[in-house]
Image (cartoon, helix red, strand yellow):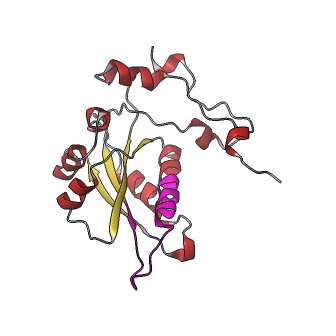
Amino acid sequence: MSLTTISRTAETSAPIHEVLAERWSPRSFDSSVEVPSEKITAALEAARWSASAANTQPWRFIVARRGTTEHDTIVENLMGFNQVWASSAQVLIVNLAAIAAEDGTPLRWSQYDLGQAVANLTVQAHHDGLHVHQMGGIEVDGLREAFDIDANLEPISVTALGVLGTPEALTSDVLREREVAPRSRRPLEEIVLVSA
C-alpha cells in the first residue's frame, strides 16, 4: 500500500486551515533530495517569532544537515525505532529549552514555549512543502555531552525535517505499516474538560 492509495488529510469535526489538516508526521524521508537553505531558515524564523511568556524566548536549536558529523551524532543519540528511520531525514534539529533566565529566575513555562516555537516551525515547513516528525525518544545526556550544551539548556526533543519519501523506503514492516495507517485523534468531547 502506498501513500497515494489513502488520504492523509485529517477528518476534522470543524473546518481548520488546510496546512494544519494536511500536516502529519512521516518516518520516510527522501535522502536524495536537498532541502534548500532558505526553507530551513524560514522554518527557524517562524520558530523565532513564536509567542513566549514575558517574551523570554527560551528556545534554542542545534541544526544539522544530513552528511555532517553533527547529523550522525544526533542519530546516535536517538532511541529505539527513531535511529532506524531518522538518518534519512535531510535535517535534524535538537530543540532545547532554557530552564532559567539570565538572572537565575526559573522559567517554569520554557518547555511550553519551546513547544509553541517548534509548532510554528512545523507549520511553516509544511507550508513550504516539507514534512516534520517530532521525537521525544532521545538520549539527553549523550546530546548534552556531544554538543557541550550549557547546563541552563535542556534538550527536550529532536525534529526530523525533510522531503517526504515513500513507505517502501522504510526497512521495517512495522514502520511501513505505521506510515500508511489511518490518522486518528481523540474526539473533542474527550479533550475539552470544561466548556462554559
Name the one closer to the observer, 79 or 10.
79
> In the rendered structure, which segment of residues is drawn in magenta?
96-121
Name the one closer to the observer, 182 or 29.
182
Name the one closer to the observer, 107 or 75.
107
Q: Is residue 131 left or right of residue 138?
A: right
Can you give x and y, in whole percent of width and height, for residue 171 in the image? Answer: 28, 22
Q: Is residue 44 magenta?
A: no
Q: Is residue 20 left or right of residue 148?
A: right
Q: Is residue 88 left or right of residue 21?
A: left
Residue appearing at x 52%, y 16% in the figure? 5
Query: In the orientation shown, which residue stands out farthest toward the bottom?
Result: 103
Can you give x and y, in whole percent of width and height, for residue 65 in the image? Answer: 26, 49
Q: Quadrant of the C terminus?
A: bottom right
Residue appearing at x 57%, y 36% in the figure? 22
Name the one closer to the observer, 58 or 80.
80
Q: Is residue 174 above or below residue 47?
A: above
Q: Is residue 151 above or below residue 133?
A: below
Q: Is residue 111 magenta?
A: yes
Can you give x and y, in whole percent of width and height, for residue 181 in the image? Answer: 50, 22
Query: In the orientation shown, which residue stands out farthest toward the top?
Result: 1
Q: Quadrant of the N terminus?
A: top left
Residue appearing at x 69%, y 42% in the figure? 16
Q: Is residue 51 above or below residue 89?
A: below
Q: Is residue 109 above or below residue 69?
A: below
